[in-house]
Image (tube, rainbow, N blue to C red):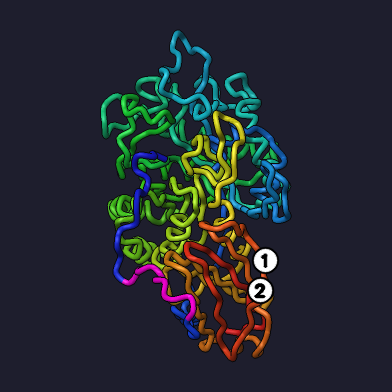
Amino acid sequence: MDRRQVLRGLAAIPGAAALTGLSAGTARADFATVVDPTADWGTWEGWGTSLSWWAKAVGPDEKVADALFGRGTTPLLGQTLPGLGMNIVRYNAGASGTHAIEGRTMKPAPSLDGYKQIEGYQLDWYSADPSSPSWNWYADAHQRDMMWLARDRGADTFELFSNSPMWWMTRNDDPRGHDGKWTSNLRDADYGRHAAYLATIARYAHDHWGIDFRSVQPVNEPCLPWTPEEGRGQEGCFFEPGQQARLIAETRTQLNARDLAWMEIPAMDENGYDYALTTWNQFDAATRQAVGRINVHGYRSDTRRDLLYAAAAAAGKRIWMSEYTDGDASGMTIARSIGYDMRWLHPTAWVYWQVVDNSNGGGWGPIELVDGRLGLVNTKYYVLAQYTRHIRPGMRIIESGHPDVVAAYDRAARKLVIVAANHGGDQWIDFDLSRFTTASSDGALVERWCTATTGTERYGYHQDTFMHGRRFWSWFPGQSVQSFEVTGVDL
């Protein structure tokens, strides 16, 4: 994740106007949307976060794990937090090390931020045997401990990813990238070794950690010109599409050799939708076939999500929004981004980059670290809870009728979930369920939860909304997000 590439504002997209506020005193709804269950946008896999770098900084804090991966209530930082119930964990295989190899040492220089320096497991190239002295399985204890805490609280989907090859596989012994822009830092002879490094970790996790990675991603934001001089302070490596294709093939071979053929390889974890589409279009048929799904990051929102979705659908591939962050502490930007992704990208999972972020009050994390220590809970935590607590794995994502509204259906429970964001002023919003076969009974309770980002309500629960025929409506304070659950609903 390169923060200089992060979304600074949402560009106008046709058909994506915000909900506009009208007079709060009108007898009718100021805005109405029709939920259409005939449009099926896929089965939801879940919500998640990457563990690096925050897990290294925080360590195995059980209260933090309760808040992020549990679904109960957790006292933390003077507040009682609703557990986010995240079930997806992305684990970063480190690239750094402090040891010397035949006189060579890693060259991070001062700009590699300490908490972003993730210790790798393979110490040198002398042996590929994971039980040999070439491997240190005690490395990176904090991130691994947090992964276990997440698993114990219900996380069930794990992905292994790499920001950079091990420093001693690089051309310049520097995991921040090559000295020349647009140049891969991985030595030509080490593509197979980098793939083997990741596959060995995946096998070791299966055998010793009680963790089965569903997928293994050998690159991260490979389109960016990673160099030590760029000063990103993190591990990174550039790969052009042909080099990515080579790594995908090598990783498939190494996983298969370890009886891990069932683990999929995603591509491409590019920095934005347009980059992902450009790279995908340059892959040959064999590479596309080897890709299990498309991962994309949401840092460039001035592009067409629908074009990437169309390409993925044509190839029969699922999409994950595998990394996103923004500096808006209120949470309204994240609500807009989730809505736009659901409307046009149609991912089956959505992953926040650093759900705990060392931004010293900058608004990047739902929970922030201040000077490296837990400091405050931003409003965006409660906004995120509106989505993660109600739209759950196994639900079917359906057409909501508007980009600021997300709708999901639970067939087993006969339950409809709607999460809506009001980016305008105070107003009534009307939800039309007339296209469902059955839409609960007239007068039935519709449970709702509200987070008013400019007020004081944080995930407040209410029992004051009822069905009127096949519709219901609710009052939305300005700049707020609400979740609704309607029971007794049939498609």
Q: Which range is magenta?
A: 15-25
**Is residue 411 shown to the viewer in this render?**
no
- When the figure is inspected, residue 467 is found, relative to residue 421, above or below; the finding is below
Binning the other alpha carbons within 10 Å of mark 1 as few (below 14), some (14 to 19) or many (20 upward) gives some
Local SS, label 1: strand
- Name the foreground residue: 91 vs 208: 91
Q: Which mark is residue 441?
A: none
Q: Where residue 158 sits in the image (x, y, percent)? A: 59, 48
Discs 1, 2 touching: Cβ within 8 Å: yes
Q: Which quadrant, please, contains the N terminus?
A: top left
User: Is 465 above or below relative to 88?
Assistant: below
What residue is pinned by disc 2?
A: 447
Screen quadrant of the C terminus: bottom right
Q: Amino acid at mark 2?
A: Glu
Which amino acid lies under the numbered mark 1 shown in the image of this protein? Tyr
Q: Nearer the viewer, mark 1 or mark 2?
A: 1
Q: Is residue 327 above or below residue 286?
A: above
Question: Looking at the image, is 123 positioned above or below residue 312?
Answer: above
Label 2: how many Cα within 10 Å (few below 14, some 14–19, many 20+): some
Q: Is residue 148 visible?
A: yes
User: In percent of the image, x 50 and y 45: which residue is there?
Assistant: 353
What residue sits right under mark 1 in the picture?
461
Residue at 70% across, 52% down: 70
Q: Quadrant of residue 132?
A: top right
